[in-house]
Image (cartoon, rainbow, N blue to C red):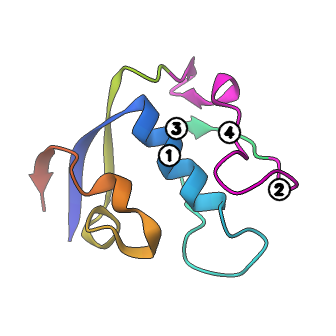
Amino acid sequence: MKIIFLIKGSQLLETLENGVSQYPKHEGRFLQVSGIQFAFDPSKPSGQRIDHRLVKVQGDYLDLSKEYSVITKIYLKQGKDGFDCLMNCPVLVIY
């Protein structure tokens, strides 16, 4: 099942950070994204690898206070693989 929910820009950044937190370890956290452009510096400590000023969503720079709609598997929304930052985001649709 999949889920569409709202997420603040600050939470989206936290989600992306979690996705690269274990790099270069091979594990399920590394996200596949669409409509998002970002880069990360693996030499920096986990949680500080992405410069939010360089993240783009649908061609626009990330606004940490703006709400974005996201679709993913319920597995991630339930906080699995360290994505607990998604657990309290308001749900729009489950299908």
User: Any magenta on residue 78?
Assistant: no
Task: Determine the CA span between mark 3 and mark 2.
Answer: 22 Å
Q: Amino acid at mark 4?
A: Phe
Task: Determine the CA span between mark 4 and mark 1.
Answer: 13 Å
**Other-residue count near label 4 (Cα within 10 Å), few / some / many at <14 / 14–19 / ≥20:** some
User: Any magenta on residue 52?
Assistant: yes
Q: Residue at x 32, y 54 (%)?
A: 86
Q: SS at mark 3? A: loop
Can you give x and y, in whole percent of width and height, for residue 50 in the image?
A: 69, 41
Task: Determine the CA span between mark 4 and mark 3.
Answer: 10 Å
Task: Determine the CA span between mark 4 and mark 2.
Answer: 13 Å
Q: Mark 4 or mark 3: which is in front?
A: 4
- Quadrant housing the C terminus: bottom left
Q: Disc 2 designates what residue?
A: 42
Task: Determine the CA span between mark 1 and mark 2.
Answer: 15 Å
Q: Amino acid at mark 3?
A: Gly
Q: Disc 3 designates what residue?
A: 35
Q: Mark 4 or mark 1: which is in front?
A: 1
Q: Disc 1 designates what residue?
A: 14
Q: Are marks 1 and 2 in contact (CB under 8 Å)?
A: no
Q: How many marks?
A: 4
Instruction: Place residue 3 in its image quadrant.
Output: bottom left
Residue 38: which numbered mark, if any? 4
First of labels 3, 2 by sequence position: 3
Q: Mark 3 or mark 2: which is in front?
A: 2
Q: Amino acid at mark 1?
A: Glu
What stretch of residues is rendered in magenta?
41-62
